[in-house]
Amino acid sequence: MTRLPDESICIGKDGTYKENGDHIYLGKHFKAVFDGATPKGRQLWEGLPGDIYASRILSEAMDNVASDICASSLITYLNNVLIKCYAASGVSFDSLAPEERLQVSAVIYSRHRREVWSFGDCTVKINDIQYRQTRAGDKMLSELRAFFTELYMLNNDILKDDDPGRSAILPVLKDYLSMANEPGEFGYDVINGGDICPNNVIIYPVKPGDRIILASDGYPELFDTLHDTENHLFRMLEKDPLCIHELRGTKGVQSGNQSFDDRSYISFYAEQ
C-alpha cells in the first residue's frame, strides 16, 4: 500500500492563513486540533475574540504537558489553563454571561498512550472509520435555521448578505451555551474553565501504522488526503451555498468568506 504524506492546514473561514478560531499543535509527543467556539458576545481577551485567544492559549500550553499524561488529566489541565486566563483578566467563569465565556473543543493524539482523545465536536478518522460528535441542540437549531431561511426567501425577492436564519436562532444559541458540560440529552462537553466532566473524554485506541486524521468541524467529511477533503467541501458549498440542505448547520457563509467555518486538518501515521 502506498504511504500517503503527512499533511496539515489551519485556515480561516475567509480563506486566509491569518490567525483564526482554530489552532493546530504538532509536537513530538502530541498532535492536536483546538477549535474555539464562534464568539456570540463582545468580550475580548488581550484584544482578541474568545475563539482565537482560547485555541491559541491551549495550543501553547501543550508544550508543558508530560508525555505520559492520561486523557482525563490532560483535559483537566487544559481547563485549568482557561481558569487562569479568567483570573488574569480580572473575571471569573460565573461572573460572565454564557456567550462571553471561553469555549474550546479538542481532539488530541498521544504518541505515548497510542490513543486519540476527543472532547467536544471535533472530528477523527482512523483508517477508514470517521468519528464525529454531533450535539443534539446544534442539530435542532440547524433545522430551525433552515426553516427561517426558507421562510425569509419565500417572503423576500432577494436574500441579503446577512444570514436571516442565523439571526433568528441567535438568541437561542446564546441560551444554549448555558448547557455546556451539563448532563442530559442536550448537554455537551467543552473545555470552558467551568465545571467540566473530564472523564467524558472519548478515547480511541490506535495501532502503529494506523492512518489518523484530526480535524475541526469545518469539514463535513474527511478523506485520506487534504486535497480530496477540500474538494469535497467546496463541491458541497457549490450545491448548498446557504448551508440549509446537505451542509445544514447553525451558520452559513458570510459575505466575503470562503466557507461557513474555520477549518483545520492534520493527517499522519501512528508511530511504532
Image: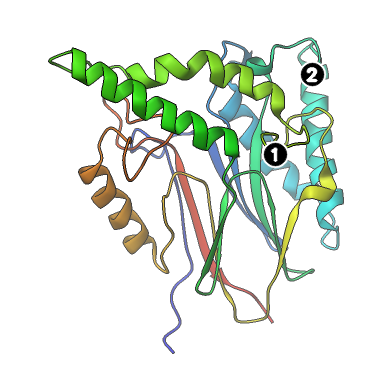
Q: Residues within 10 Å of mark 1 (few under 14, many from 20)?
A: many
Quadrant position of the C terminus in the picture: bottom right
Q: Amino acid at mark 2?
A: Phe
Which of label 2 and label 1 is nearer to you?
A: 2
Q: Residue at label 1?
A: 58
Kindly tell me whether residue 45 is visible in this rendering: no
Q: From mark 2 to mark 1, how far is it between C-alphas?
A: 17 Å
Counting from the top left corner in percent of width and height, residue 179 is at 70, 27
Identified at 60% across, 49% down, the residue is 133
Q: Is residue 174 above or below residue 189?
A: above
Q: Residues within 10 Å of mark 2 (few under 14, many from 20)?
A: some
Disc 1 secondary structure class: helix
Q: Which mark is residue 70?
A: none
Q: Earlier in the sequence, mark 2 or mark 1?
A: 1
Left or right: residue 38 compared with residue 239: right
The residue most toward the bottom is 1
Left or right: residue 201 compared with residue 25: right
Q: Which mark is residue 93?
A: 2
How many badges with numbers are in the image? Answer: 2
Identified at 78% across, 19% down, the residue is 86
Task: Choose top left, top right, bottom left or bottom right for residue 52.
Answer: top right
Q: Is residue 117 above or below residue 138?
A: below
What kind of colouring is applied to the model shown? rainbow
Disc 2 secondary structure class: loop
Q: Amino acid at mark 1?
A: Leu
Counting from the top left corner in percent of width and height, residue 196 is at 81, 36
Q: Are marks 2 and 1 in contact (CB under 8 Å)?
A: no
Taking depth in this image into account, of 267 and 194 the one nearest to the observer is: 194
Counting from the top left corner in percent of width and height, residue 266 is at 52, 59
Left or right: residue 96 compared with residue 32: right
